[in-house]
Amino acid sequence: MLVPPSFPVLIFSPLLPEESVAWTQGQLLSCSLNTTDLVALSGAHTFGRARCQSFTNRLYNFSGTGSPDQTLNSTYLETLSEICPQNGNSSVLTNFDPVTPTLLMQIISQIFKFRKACSKAIKAFQLAGLIPSTLSTTSALIRAHFESSWNPMIKMGNISPLTGTDGEID
């Protein structure tokens, strides 16, 4: 089994999960990151956890419709609804996706194939056509993913966040 590399964690500047692909790309481009960096940074979330508050809109009021996101797998919708009931505790954590990480490219392929990602951003990247071209240039081995992710993570960590009167960090 390959073990992910470790390196000192830099303070990452936050991106907003509900923003559009164009906005996110603009933010990253203004910081000298490109589309490949965007996908690598998004893929890193496959191994993470999400608070209910970051995706309950997809479960109960997607795009202000009062209904769930119809592109979300119905079985996964039920699972997420049990973990994050409407008007429930928004700080509850759940896996960012239901697939146990083994080989990253297999994970990402399954997430897209079965529409099982609570993140609106991952869905938006796929719909914008960013994911397939990037996946085809990235090795399926998890080691290769980590190696391709180091540079964007380091770049992202070196971005100086706006603070004080110039910006607000929640």
Image (spheres, grey):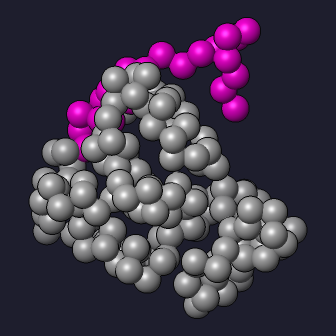
| 161 in magenta | yes
The answer to whether any part of residue 112 appears in the image is yes
Q: Nearer the viewer, residue 47 or 117?
A: 117
Picture coordinates of residue 102, whole percent (x, y)? 25, 72
Q: Residue at x 40, y 73 (%)?
A: 112
Q: Is residue 127 above or below residue 152?
A: below
| 129 in magenta | no
Picture coordinates of residue 57, whole percent (x, y)? 74, 64
Q: Is residue 80 above or below residue 92?
A: below
Q: Residue at x 70, y 32 (%)?
A: 170
Q: Residue at x 51, y 46 (%)?
A: 21
Which residue range is magenta in the image? Answer: 149-170
Q: Is residue 72 above or below residue 29?
A: below
18 vs 45, left or right, is: right
Residue most toward the right?
87
User: Looking at the image, how many numbered discs can be counted on the residues?
Assistant: 0
Q: Nearer the viewer, residue 131 or 44?
A: 131
Picture coordinates of residue 114, whole percent (x, y)? 43, 83
Q: Is residue 39 above or below residue 170?
A: below
Residue most toward the bottom?
75
The answer to whether any part of residue 49 appears in the image is no
Picture coordinates of residue 122, whole percent (x, y)? 47, 59
Res 38 quadrant in image: top left
Q: Residue at x 49, y 30 (%)?
A: 27
79 vs 160, left or right, is: right
* Quarter of the picture holding the N terminus: bottom left
Q: Nearer the viewer, residue 9 or 70?
A: 70
Res 152 quadrant in image: top left
